[in-house]
Every structure is written in C-alpha cells, then in structure tokens.
Image: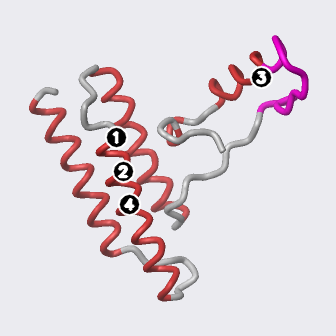
C-alpha cells in the first residue's frame, strides 16, 4: 500500500469514527442513537479489519469508493444501515441449473458499489 493510499484509508476511518461520535438517530430516541452509533463503529471496525491485508491497488480503490459512498448515503438519508437492493426482473428463479446461475450472475452485476463488501442475505 502506498503512503497516499494509507493516509486516505486512515482519514476515512477517522471520519467514520467522528461521524459515529456525533450521530443522532432520525427518530430522536436515545436508545436508537446508541444502537446506531454502535453499529457504525462495529461495521467500520469489521470492514477495515477485513480489508487490512489487501495489496491490489484497484481493489483498494474500490473499497475506498464503497466507503465514501456509504458515508454519503448514510449522511444524506440519516440512516447508517445499508440500503436494500432490489432483484433484477425474474430474480427469483426456482429452477436449478443454467437459469439459476444466470440469475446469480445478474444479481452480482446489479449489486451497487456501497454493498460490495456485504454478502447476500
């Protein structure tokens, strides 16, 4: 990892932690605020640790873009949780084989940048 990439990643991490410290839930309920703050810190810690050993510059760049997108979406909608993704048309193939593999490929392609690090649920 280059020095500029390292400083960018560290500044993003610090930004996320600062956002978590000052986060106020949209509902205004104290327990919701605390839950959302814990979620933000836990999610940041998990994802940054998970990607700590990355060495491919292109992959690191995509992770940085994902982090920036999640920050902007979270601040805009005042919701720290990832937004739902919607399946493409015919996204619930019940048959096995080629159709199912094609649908899985379409789902992977339709996944937005801010959810690249999340597994499908």
Magenta stretch: helix, strand or loop mostly: loop
* Residue 14 higher or lower than 22, as above or below: above
Q: CA distance from mark 1 to mark 2?
A: 6 Å
Disc 1 is placed on an element classified as: helix
Label 3 sits on residue: 103
Give the crowd class for mark 2: few <14, some 14-19, many >=20 residues within 10 Å. few
**Nearer the N terminus, badge 1 or badge 4?**
4
* Residue 39 higher or lower than 43, as above or below: below
Q: Are marks 4 and 2 in contact (CB under 8 Å)?
A: yes
What residue is rendered at 26% in x and 49% in y?
Answer: 12
Q: CA distance from mark 1 to mark 4?
A: 12 Å
Q: Which region is colored magenta?
A: 88-100
- Name the spot of residue 55 as percent of width and height, x first: 24, 23
Q: Are marks 1 and 4 in contact (CB under 8 Å)?
A: no
- Name the spot of residue 31 as percent of width and height, x first: 50, 85
Disc 2 is placed on an element classified as: helix
Disc 3 is placed on an element classified as: helix
Label 2 sits on residue: 46
**Nearer the N terminus, badge 1 or badge 3?**
1
* Residue 19 higher or lower than 101, as above or below: below
Residue 64 sits inside the magenta stretch: no
In terms of depth relative to the viewer, which is nearer, 53 or 81? 53
Q: CA distance from mark 4 to mark 2?
A: 6 Å
Label 1 sits on residue: 50
Q: Is residue 80 left or right of residue 100?
A: left
What residue is rendered at 23% in x and 42% in y?
Answer: 9
Residue 93 sits inside the magenta stretch: yes
The N terminus: image quadrant? top left
Label 4 sits on residue: 42
């Amino acid at each position: 990892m280059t020095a500029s990439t390292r400083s960018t990643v560290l500044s993003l991490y610090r930004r996320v932690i600062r956002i978590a410290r000052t986060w106020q839930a949209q509902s205004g309920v104290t327990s919701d605020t605390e839950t959302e703050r814990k979620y933000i810190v836990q999610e940041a810690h998990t994802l940054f640790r998970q990607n700590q050993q990355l060495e491919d510059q292109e992959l690191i760049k995509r992770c940085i873009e994902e982090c920036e997108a999640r920050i902007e979406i979270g601040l805009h909608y005042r919701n720290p949780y990832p937004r739902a993704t919607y399946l493409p048309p015919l996204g619930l193939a019940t048959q096995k084989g080629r159709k199912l593999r094609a649908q899985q490929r379409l789902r992977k392609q339709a996944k937005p940048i801010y959810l690249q690090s999340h597994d499908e649920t």
